[in-house]
Amino acid sequence: MRPDDGTASGALGLMARGATQAQRKRQAQAQPKQKRKAQSWEDQLFFARLRRHAKWMFVMLALVFGVGFVAFGVGSGSTGISDILRGNFFGGSSGTSSRIHTDEKALARNPGNVQAALELSTLYQQKQETAKAIAMLERTSNAKPKNIDVLNALAGIYREQTSQAKNDAAAAQNELASRAVTPPGLDLNSTLGQALASDPLTESLKSKATDAFSKLTAAYAKAEGAYKRVADVARGSSQEPNAQLQLASIAVEAVQITGQRSDIVVAVNAYKRYLKLEPKGVSANQARQTLAQLQSFLPKTQR
């Protein structure tokens, strides 16, 4: 074979391979694209479940995150779940006990610590330990006899006790009255009437009612005495007008309960003093009206 024939044969081979590649390319371009296989119903159900599961997972994560904020005190200034368990998170009893202990120590170091005394009084009352509150305030008033805030706190407690004593006395009286109902037409002076009125249960109720009334009068005496102390300490100050009105008010209540002339005198003098201090005060007209009514029960020499 001549060299020219080899060269020609190589050129023809290259042209054949190029034509073959071009034909394959055209066939590939002409062939339509296969459509994506449609999801089966099993696939669709699976993905639906997955989406729902993912949604609940997001919700659970949000809840866990939120609970984490509460439980571990994130951003709340709290020390976490232990605060809730101890009651501190909502200001529970352990927190109150701690404050009581702190105030008691402060008063032990300084019996005249008014701020500690006032706070401790409130805490004792919250725990229904009124007797402790009174005793503590009395000690503080001995150390600070001119402190009107301490005296007002004491007077306020005594006044609250009059309300409780009034309720107890009313309940005892009602109980006795319900027992004392006698059959219509029965003569109470008869043997049967006297027997019904003096049976053991009725006698017990009478004793209970008498005791309740005695406690009621004693409660008003304590409250009235406490407000007298406030008025005496406040004398000559800007707080005196209000102190005199408070004294007059508790004395009027005592009059309505006991009817004692001594309480009328206290109320009259308190109203007179108030009207002298504030003749055109907000409560002046009411004070004059009540004063006139009270004076009508007194002899002219005491008006």
Image (cartoon, rainbow, N blue to C red):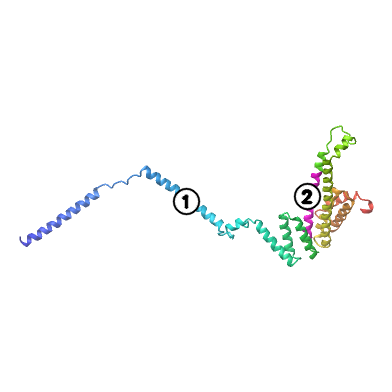
Residue 286, percent across and down? 83, 51
- Residue furthest right in the image: 301
Residue drawn at x 8%, y 60% is: 6
Q: Quadrant of residue 15?
A: bottom left
Q: Is residue 96 left or right of residue 178?
A: left
Residue 18, percent across and down? 17, 55
Q: Nearer the viewer, residue 91 or 14?
A: 91
Q: Quadrant of residue 85?
A: bottom right
Q: Secondary structure at mark 2?
A: helix
Amino acid carrying mark 2 in the image: Gln
- Residue furthest left in the image: 1
| Residue 144 visible at all | no
150 over 210 or under it: above or below: below
Q: Is residue 41 left or right of residue 95?
A: left
Badge 2 is on which residue?
164
Task: Count how many numbered circles sit on residues in the image.
Answer: 2
Q: Label 2: how many residues lie within 10 Å, few (<14), some (14-19) or many (20+)? A: few
Amino acid carrying mark 1 in the image: Met
Residue drawn at x 75%, y 64% is: 114
Dot label at residue 57: 1
Calculate the distance from the C-alpha at mark 1 to the C-alpha at mark 2: 57 Å
Q: Quadrant of residue 234?
A: bottom right
Residue 216 is one of the magenta-drawn residues: no
| Type of secondary structure dominating the magenta stretch | helix
Q: Nearer the viewer, mark 1 or mark 2?
A: 2
Residue 82, percent across and down? 59, 58
Q: Are marks 1 and 2 in contact (CB under 8 Å)?
A: no
Q: Nearer the viewer, residue 175 or 32?
A: 175
Residue range in magenta is: 151-172
Residue 156 is one of the magenta-drawn residues: yes
Residue drawn at x 13%, y 56% is: 13
